[in-house]
Image (spheres, grey):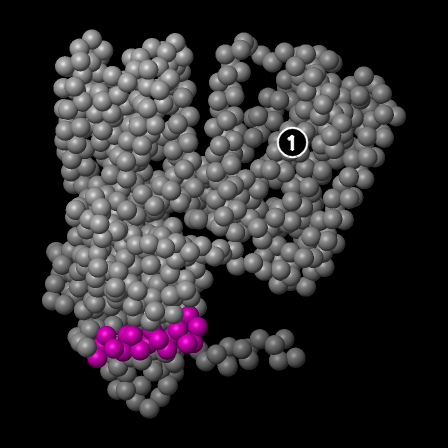
Amino acid sequence: MIGIFIRLKVRLLRNVFRSSGGIGLFLFAIASLAAGILAAAELWEAEQRTREAAAPILASILIVGWLLGPVLLGASDETIDTTRLALFPLSARPLALGMAASGLIGIGPVAASLPLLALAVRADGMVAVLLGIVASFLTLLVATSSSRWLLTVLGNRLRQRRSRDLATIITGLTVGAVGLFLQAVSRLGPGVEIDRMESIARVVRWTPAGWVGEALARLQRGEKVGPILLLLATAALVAFVLWRWTASLERALTEVDDGGTDDNLTGHLVQDRGPLSRLDPRLAAVFAKERRYLVRHPRYRIQVVSQGTVLLIGGAPFLSAVVARNPEAVLMGCVPGLTAGITGSNLLGTDGRALWAEVMALPRLRIILRGRSMAFVTLGLAASLLVTLGVATWTGGWRFVPVALGAAVGMAFTGSGVGAYTSTLAPTLFPDEDNPNPFATTAPGQGCVNGVTTMAGVFIGLLLALPILGGLALARDSVGLGLATAAVAPFYGFAIWFGVTNLAGRRIDGRAPDLLEQLASL
Amino acid sequence: MDGLDLRVPSGTFFGVVGPNGAGKSTTLKIATGLLRPDSGTAVVDGLNVWADPAAVKARIGVVPEDLRLFERLSGLELLEYVGLLRGLGRKESQSRARELLALLDLEEAAGRLVLDYSTGMRKKIAMGAAVLHRPKVLFLDEPFESVDPLSVRVLRALLERLVQTGSTVVFSSHVMEVVERLCDHVAVVHAGRVVAGGPTAQLCDGRRLEDVFVDAVGGQSATLAADAIEWLSD
C-alpha cells in the first residue's frame, strides 16, 4: 500500500509539471528550494548559540505551518482526499500508512528537510549526526501525519461553505497581519536579536511541536540521552497521531456531507421603493447584485481588507497629523474613497465563469461595468464617511467634514471609473468556489498581471484626482474655496467615471465571445 | 466544426445527438452567440447571430452544459436578476420568479444561495432563468442530466408547453430514449458534421433511435465490444 501511494504521488506530481499548472508548480519548487537552501546555508554558517535557539523555532514553525497551511489555503493533494478513496476496498490502517508515506514525497518535504539536515550535520559527533537525521525525519513525519489527521477530522466541515468562507477570511487577515507585523519589525532595526530568539525557543521547546527541535538543539552541544528521550517522545506522538488518524479515517470513509447550509435569504434583489427604483432597472439590478457580493463573497472581503492594509501602510506618514489632533487631517478622509473605488479593478473576472448569463441577457456589456463599479463607489463612500467622521471626532475638525465628504464622492467615482477601465485590461478569473485560498489564481502569473494593472490604475487615479486634491489644499486656508471644492468635486468625479466607463465599455461591447473565451482559457 | 449545416424548423422540439466530442456543445454555443465561429453564419429567427447579437439574445434562452451561475445570490434573487437584465421590470420579474420557483419545486430553497444547491437544483434554476423572459427559441445542453425523474416530468411539461405555444426548443443529449420520446426532429452530429437528420419518425422508420445513431456514427454494437473482453465472460 505504501508503495502504491508513493507511486501515485510521484505520478501526480509529474503530471502537474506536464500540465498547464506546471509553470506555477515549477515556480513554487524554485522558490521553496531556494528558501530551503538559503535557510540551510544560514544555519550551517551560524554560531552554536544561534543554531540551538533556531532549532526548536524552526521545527515548531514547520509543524504548525504544515498543520494549518492546508486547512487555510485549501489542500489539493489528491492522495489525501478521502472522498476519492472512499469507494475502494481499503481499510483505514494501511490507508493511513500509505497516506503518511506519500506525505513525505514532494517539493515541500524536500525544501523543509534542507535546514533540518543542516542542523543535523552540524551536530557534535557522528552519533549526534545520525540522531539529528532521525530527528529531521521525525519532524517531517509529525508535520505531515498531524496535518493529514487534522484534514481528515475537519474533512466534512471544510467542505461546508461557511467553513470555506471562514478559512478564506482568516487566511486573508493572517497574511495582512503578518504583512503589518513585518513592516513593524523592519522599523525596529536590522536582524532579530539572539536573546529574543532564545526567549521564544525557551517557550516552544516544551510544546509537542518543539520536542524534536529541542532534541536537535541539544545535539548541537553533543548531548545524547536527553535527545534520545525527546526523540522517543516524538515517536510516541507520531504513533498516537497515526492511531487517532486511523480512527478518523474510518469515519471519514463512511460519512458524507453535502456541504450545504440552510440559509434563508428573504427579500427581493431590488426593492420597489428607494433610490434604486429610480435607476435604469438593468443598471439597478447589476448594482444590487454586486452590492450583495461585496457583503457575501469572502474574496471581496479580503480585497477590501487588503486595500485597507495598503492604505494603512501607505498612509502611515499622515497618521502623525491624526495623532497630533490636527483638524486638517479630516481632509484625508476622502482618500479611502479613491482606493476603495480602485479595489474594483477586476469587475469582469471575479464572477467570470457566470459572465455568460449576463452576456445572454444584456444588450451591451458596459451595463455590467457601470453597475458593478457603482457598488464600489458606495464602498468608497462608506469607507470615507467612516474615516472622516472618526478623524473629525478625534481632532475636532468638523469644519472640514463637508469638504472631505464632497471630495470623497469625487474620489470614489474617479477611483471606480479607473477600476472599471483596469478591469477590461486583464480580467483575473477567480478560482472555483470550493477553493478557500484567497490568493489562489486559475493561471500562473495572473495575480502579478492584475497587480501591475492595479498599480497603474492607482497612479492614473491619483493623476485624475489631482484637481480634487488641489481643491483640498486650497480648502485648508479658505472656507469659500473649500465649499466650492465640496460642490464641484462630485460632479467632476462623476464626469470622470462616466467618461472612463464609457471608454471601458467600448473596449468590451461586442467582444463578449472573445472575453468569454479569454476567461474560459484561464 | 467541419462545415456543419443544421436547419431547425420553427416550433419544433429539436434534438441534437452525437458522441462525446462530436461538436454538439460547440454548435449550440455558436448558435447562441457565446462562441465566435472562424467562418460561416448562424441565423436565429431570421436574424444573423453575429450581425445583430443583441436582437438575437433577446429572443433566445440558454442552459449551457458548463453550468456556472451567480453562486452568491439566492435562487429567488438569481431569477429576479435575470428578469431585470432581460428588461422585464421589477414586479414582473418578481412574480415570474415566484411562479417558476413554485413550478420547479424550489420554493423552499428560494432563500438559499445557489452555491448550496445540488446539481439537479442548479439545472432547474438555470432552466427557470432561461425561460423567464418567454424566449422564442430555447437552447439546452444536456438539460436532464442529474435531474430527478419527478423534476424531469415538470421540465418536460414546461418545454412541451413552450413548443405548443410556438416556441422552438433545441437541446442536446446523450440519452437517446429522452430524445426519441420528446423530439419531433433529430440531428445526429459526428466529427463536426451532421451525419443524419430529419423528422424523428422518418429517421427512425420503426427502429430505435439508438440503433440509428450507432449506424450513423459508425460505432460497433455494445454487445460485440463487451464480448471481445475474455475475462468479463469468466
Q: Please provide the residue range marked out in magenta.
A: B147-164
State whether residue A135 appears in this view: yes
Residue located at (48% from left, 18% from top): A183
Q: Main secondary structure of the magenta part?
A: helix
Side of A181 relative to A206 (left or right): left
Label 1 resides on the chain identified as A
Quarter of image, res A103: top right
Q: Quadrant of the N terminus of chain A?
A: bottom right
Residue lying at 83% horizontally and 35% vertically, measured from the top left: A232
Whether residue B90 is in magenta: the answer is no
**SS label for mark 1:** helix
- Give the image location of residue B72, x and y in percent: 38, 50
Q: How many marks?
A: 1
Give residue A250's position: percent from left, percent from top: 69, 57
Name above or below for residue A288 compared with residue B181. Answer: above
Quarter of the image that includes the C terminus of chain A: top left
Please identify the quarter of the rendering in which residue A197 is found: top right
Q: Is residue B4 left or right of residue A143?
A: left
Name the residue type under label 1: Leu
- Residue A28 rendering spot, x and y as whole percentages: 52, 34
Q: Is residue A257 left or right of residue A470?
A: right
Q: Which one is nearer the viewer's eye here, A485 or A362?
A: A485
Decide whether residue B148 is among the magenta residues: yes
Residue placed farthest to the bottom in the image? B206
Mark 1 neighbour class, 10 Å CA radius: few under 14, some 14 to 19, many 20 or more: many
Give the residue pinned by disc 1.
A62
